Structures are given as C-alpha cells and as structure tokens.
Image: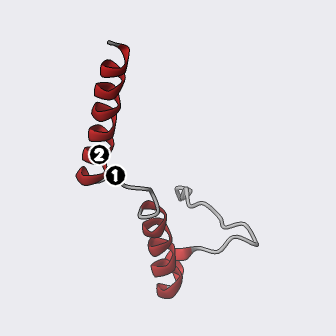
Amino acid sequence: MAEQNVPQNVENEQDPGANTQMFRAFVNEGQTEATTEPRLNGRILAVVGAAVVLIAVIAAIAVF
C-alpha cells in the first residue's frame, strides 16, 4: 500500500479549515490587515502639488 503524504498537525497548532468559525476568522484576519494601509487620494495630491508650485513661484520672485 502506498504511503500518503499528509502533514501531521503539531500538538499546539490548530487547523483553521477544521472549524467553520475558525476558518472565517482566519480569512477575515487577512482582509483586515490589507485595509489598514494609508491611501492618498487625488485631492490630497493636488493640494500638495499646488503648495509646492506656490512655494516655487514665491521663491523665484524673491530671488529676482
């Protein structure tokens, strides 16, 4: 009879696929980490860009 290559669980390790609630918590845990990254939208970038241009214009006027 051929041996099956089935990994054996370590005593303290729990399989999230064995329990529906554990599996859902495992899946949701990965989703919450992805949404915590900061996002820059177009409005913030436009304001920062306008401020840089304004500072550049004022600096050019002050030099001359």
Q: 36 left or right of 50?
A: right
How many numbered marks does the figure carry? Answer: 2
Residue of label 1 = 40
- Residue sitting at x 37%, y 14%: 63
Label 1 near label 2: C-beta < 8 Å?
yes
Q: 63 left or right of 30?
A: left
Q: Is residue 32 above or below residue 2?
A: below
Could you tell me which secondary element the residue under label 1 belongs to? loop
The percent position of residue 42, horizontal first and vertical second, equals 23, 50
> Which quadrant of the rendered structure holds the C terminus?
top left
Could you tell me which secondary element the residue under label 2 belongs to? helix
Please, which colouring scheme is shown?
secondary structure
The percent position of residue 32, horizontal first and vertical second, equals 46, 69
Q: Nearer the viewer, mark 2 or mark 1?
A: 2
Q: Which of marks 2 and 1 is nearer the N terminus?
A: 1
Three-letter residue code for mark 1 = Leu
Disc number for residue 45: 2
Three-letter residue code for mark 2 = Leu
